[in-house]
Image: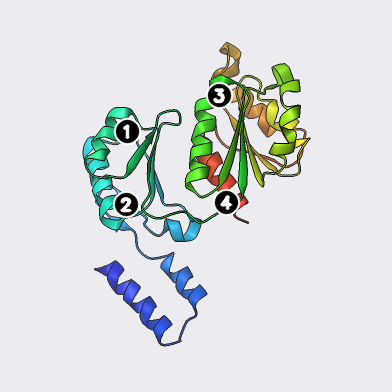
């Protein structure tokens, strides 16, 4: 009821000419969230970011996920469930009919409305072992309305594999580079392109890689300019960041 009253006040102010459309949109983006007790869903995130809620599923009980799914279906809001297993996806299907499972990226995608169109994003995986994180970034960027081009297994161990792809990569407004081991590829790519490079360290590597820490530190110390870094294995964050950059 509180949300309905707030929405009515904003619409009345707009109708009476006391605020303009841009001010109304700004006010709408700040409306209250839906309080489900131990879960609070922000249905106006899509107004601010152009993409709905992203629900991290590990650690959530079936009861919590069902509660979230019911609310998504009721509000008909676009949403992503990340790091989700097939059995949890099957659970959600009983409550959201149009939910789609992406096995490679471990995402369940729920779309009721088409996304706003954004620019092109390139997602580069250094090795095939980095592909699950790269697919996570690619699927999130696509869900947000980007045209995504994928490039896999072009790491520094055979850097000549990258060069024929550069004409396509350089067309992108944002570039996500996913790499484990020593994490050198983002710096190499950034030295060859004009777009921002969003570097994603992965936990792929042998013992001294420390679960991706070695790659993370390498990327933070990138020699090339224009490299920004997300956390280890954070394909979701990289995909969303790329989509926001590509919308400008």
Q: Position of residue 235 (x, y in %)?
A: 52, 35
Rendered-image quadrant of the C terminus:
bottom right
Q: Measure how far apart labels 1 and 4 are at the Cα level.
A: 28 Å
* Residue at the disc numbered 4: 244
Disc nearest the viewer among 1 and 3:
3
Residue 59: give its label. 1
Q: Earlier in the sequence, mark 1 or mark 4?
A: 1
Q: Earlier in the sequence, mark 2 or mark 3?
A: 2
Element under disc 1: loop
Q: Left or right of 31: which side holds 218? A: right
Quadrant position of residue 44: bottom left
Element under disc 2: strand
Element under disc 4: helix
- Residue drawn where x is 38% and y is 51% of the image: 78
Q: Position of residue 21 (x, y in %)?
A: 49, 76
Q: Measure how far apart labels 2 and 3 are at the Cα level.
A: 33 Å
- Residue drawn where x is 49% and y is 34% of the image: 136
* Of 151 and 237, the residue lying toward us: 151
Q: Measure how far apart labels 1 and 3 are at the Cα level.
A: 24 Å
Q: Badge 3: few (under 14), some or many (20 or more) residues near its Cα, within 10 Å? A: many
Disc nearest the viewer among 1 and 4:
4
Q: Is residue 17 above or below residue 76?
A: below
Q: Position of residue 17 (x, y in %)?
A: 45, 87
């Amino acid at each position: 009821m509180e949300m309905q009253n707030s929405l009515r006040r904003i619409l009345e102010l707009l109708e009476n000419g006391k605020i303009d459309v841009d001010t109304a949109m700004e006010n709408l983006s700040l409306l209250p969230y839906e309080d489900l007790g131990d879960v609070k869903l922000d249905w106006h995130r899509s107004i601010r970011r152009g993409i709905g809620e992203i629900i991290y599923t590990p650690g959530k009980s079936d009861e919590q996920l069902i509660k979230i799914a019911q609310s998504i279906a009721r509000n008909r809001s676009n949403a992503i469930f990340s790091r989700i297993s097939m059995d949890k996806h099957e659970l959600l299907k009983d409550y959201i009919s149009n939910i789609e499972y992406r096995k490679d990226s471990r995402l369940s995608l729920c779309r009721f409305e088409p996304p706003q169109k954004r620019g092109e994003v390139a997602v580069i995986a250094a090795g095939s072992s980095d592909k699950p994180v790269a697919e996570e970034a690619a699927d999130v960027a696509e869900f947000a309305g980007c045209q995504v081009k994928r490039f896999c297994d072009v790491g520094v161990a055979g850097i000549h594999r990258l060069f024929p792809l550069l004409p396509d990569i350089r067309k992108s407004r944002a570039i996500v580079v996913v790499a484990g081991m020593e994490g050198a590829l983002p710096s190499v790519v950034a030295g060859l392109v004009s777009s921002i490079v969003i570097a994603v360290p992965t936990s792929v590597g042998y013992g001294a890689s420390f679960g991706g820490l070695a790659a993370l530190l390498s990327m933070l110390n990138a020699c090339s300019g224009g490299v920004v870094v997300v956390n280890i294995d954070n394909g979701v964050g990289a995909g969303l960041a790329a989509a926001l950059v590509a919308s400008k």
